[in-house]
Amino acid sequence: MRFKPNEGSLMTKADIIGLLSNAVEESLDAIKTENLYTFDGKSGYSLGQGQ
């Protein structure tokens, strides 16, 4: 699952920690995390299937 900020907002490292903390509270395992960066307004990552 990918979490992205609302249009015009930035996601901070603290936001990511908050998401992971919420997952722990709900007994969900985080197997892998990756930060999705943009460069000059363009995605620096491949879109997921169906995106």
Image (spheres, rainbow, N blue to C red):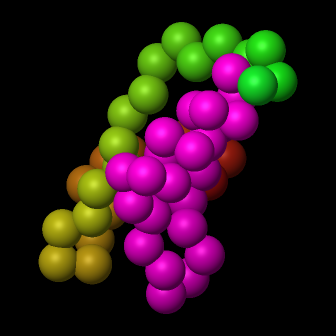
Expressed as whole percent of the image width and height from the top left, the position of residue 41 reads 27, 78
- Asked if residue 43 lies left or right of residue 21, the reply is left
Q: Is residue 19 above or below residue 13?
A: above
> Is residue 46 or residue 4 the one in the foreground?
4
Q: Is residue 49 magenta?
A: no
- Asked if residue 10 lies left or right of residue 15, the reply is left
> Is residue 38 or residue 22 the one in the foreground?
22
Q: Residue at x 44, y 28 (%)?
A: 33
* Furthest residue in direction left, as rendered: 40
- Asked if residue 5 lies left or right of residue 14, the reply is right
Q: Residue at x 28, y 71 (%)?
A: 42
Q: Is residue 4 above or below residue 21?
A: below
> Is residue 25 or residue 38 the one in the foreground?
25
Which quarter of the picture shows residue 25? top right
Which quarter of the picture shows residue 22? top right
Which quarter of the picture shows residue 7? bottom right
Q: Is residue 5 above or below residue 6?
A: above
Q: Is residue 21 magenta?
A: yes
Can residue 2 be seen in the rendering of this structure?
no
* Furthest residue in direction bottom, as rendered: 8
Q: Is residue 31 above or below residue 35?
A: above
Chain part drawn in magenta? 1-24
Expressed as whole percent of the image width and height from the top left, the position of residue 37 reads 28, 56
Expressed as whole percent of the image width and height from the top left, the position of residue 50 reads 67, 47
- Asked if residue 8 lies left or right of residue 24, the reply is left
> Is residue 49 or residue 14 the one in the foreground?
14
Can residue 37 be seen in the rendering of this structure?
yes
Tag count in the figure?
A: 0
